[in-house]
Image: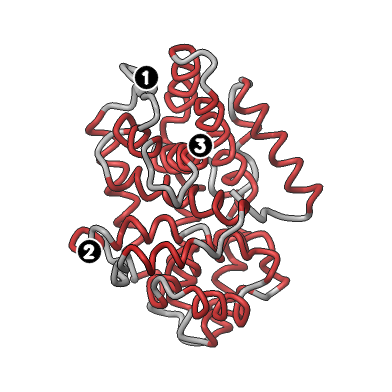
């Protein structure tokens, strides 16, 4: 086991608030009501395009996070038409393709299970190839849910059978460094929802199975922590600073800060206006740099 980080009193989000925020996330993700009027591919496309027009109405970070959960759920519903590829390959919704591919990848992998040729074929057939890593990212999260089938059923996620050790190793043998980083980020996101505190999430991320990279698992946990607690970004930033102060020289702390900044930049990418509303600090500056890199590269192709 990797040496633990010093985590005592780093997270200032009250436990009851953190639990409430997670429940809100799950309820938003499970709800099918917003999609009951969508009956054709054009309806889904219009719903996504309307999100761009609604960006100005989404003033706070929490509203911007709700948009992402809405889009993750929407692409799951849209898979009834051509496996959702009509949205994944549609140039008119390029801004939202990253989150659409994440939500789509999670739903598809939950169906294909740990059958790499089958899952890879589905990605090649339906997804925009530029967003392949984002479609793979949820593999780590589904790994968590497959080990907790009852809890996963309660929150409305499909659960693939968990494979035997040999099949599991064969599945992960298909991944290079970039893919491992992506699925490790998803694993970290899953760990954060699995446990009841950030402290426990970071401990489990550090001690992750050999298929995952612990630093990118920490980055994923920080990403999820920021999204879920987006109503308390000041406390999230404070947590990142405290983690660094109490663990001087630990590289893992940089990955936590990177995860927070990545989440903030992702909120900004999907619904502009957040960064200009935040008080300047090192993480906000870093989020701005990440956003500029997205613009230079033409999109968000990894988290």
Using the image as rendered, state which of residue 134 and residue 72 is in the foreground.
Answer: 134
- Is 59 placed above or below 234 here? below
Asked if the residue under mark 2 is in contact with the one under mark 1, i.e. CB atoms within 8 Å, the reply is: no
Instruction: Indicate left or right for 261 with 297 as reference.
Output: left
Q: Residues within 10 Å of mark 1 (few under 14, many from 20)?
A: many
Residue labelled with disc 1: 10
Residue under the image location 37 percent in, 18 percent down:
6
- Is 14 placed above or below 172 here? above
x and y percentages locating residue 3 in the rendered image? 38, 24
| C-alpha separation, residue under disc 1 versus residue under disc 2 | 31 Å
x and y percentages locating residue 75 in the rendered image? 49, 71
The secondary structure type at the circle numbered 1 is loop
Instruction: Indicate left or right for 163 with 120 as reference.
Output: left
Q: Nearer the viewer, mark 1 or mark 2?
A: 2
Residue labelled with disc 2: 149
Using the image as rendered, state which of residue 212 and residue 76 is in the foreground.
Answer: 212
Using the image as rendered, state which of residue 192 and residue 177 is in the foreground.
Answer: 177
- Is 50 placed above or below 64 here? below
């Amino acid at each position: 086991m990797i040496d633990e980080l010093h985590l005592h009193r780093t997270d200032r989000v009250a436990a009851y608030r953190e639990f409430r925020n997670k429940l809100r996330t799950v309820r938003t993700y499970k709800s099918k009501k917003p999609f009951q009027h969508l009956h054709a591919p054009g309806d889904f496309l219009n719903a996504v395009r309307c999100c761009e027009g609604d960006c100005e109405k989404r003033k706070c970070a929490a509203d911007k996070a709700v948009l992402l959960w809405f889009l993750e759920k929407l692409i799951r519903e849209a898979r009834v038409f051509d496996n959702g590829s009509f949205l994944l390959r549609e140039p008119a919704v390029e801004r939202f393709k990253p989150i659409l591919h994440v939500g789509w990848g999670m739903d598809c992998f939950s169906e294909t299970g740990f059958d790499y040729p089958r899952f890879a074929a589905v990605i090649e057939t339906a997804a925009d190839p530029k967003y392949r890593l984002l479609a793979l990212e949820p593999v780590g999260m589904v790994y968590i849910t497959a080990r907790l089938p009852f809890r996963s059923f309660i929150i409305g996620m499909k659960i693939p059978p968990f494979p035997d050790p040999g099949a599991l190793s064969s599945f992960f043998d298909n991944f290079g460094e970039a893919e491992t980083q992506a699925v490790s980020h998803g694993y970290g996101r899953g760990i954060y929802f699995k446990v009841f505190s950030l402290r426990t999430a970071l401990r489990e991320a550090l001690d992750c199975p050999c298929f995952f990279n612990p630093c990118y698992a920490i980055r994923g946990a920080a990403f999820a922590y920021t999204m879920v607690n987006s109503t308390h970004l000041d406390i999230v930033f404070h947590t990142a600073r405290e983690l660094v102060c109490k663990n001087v020289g630990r590289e893992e702390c940089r990955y936590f800060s990177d995860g927070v900044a990545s989440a903030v930049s992702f909120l900004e990418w999907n619904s502009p206006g957040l960064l200009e509303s935040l008080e300047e600090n090192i993480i906000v500056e870093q989020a701005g740099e990440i956003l500029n890199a997205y613009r230079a590269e033409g999109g968000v192709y990894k988290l």
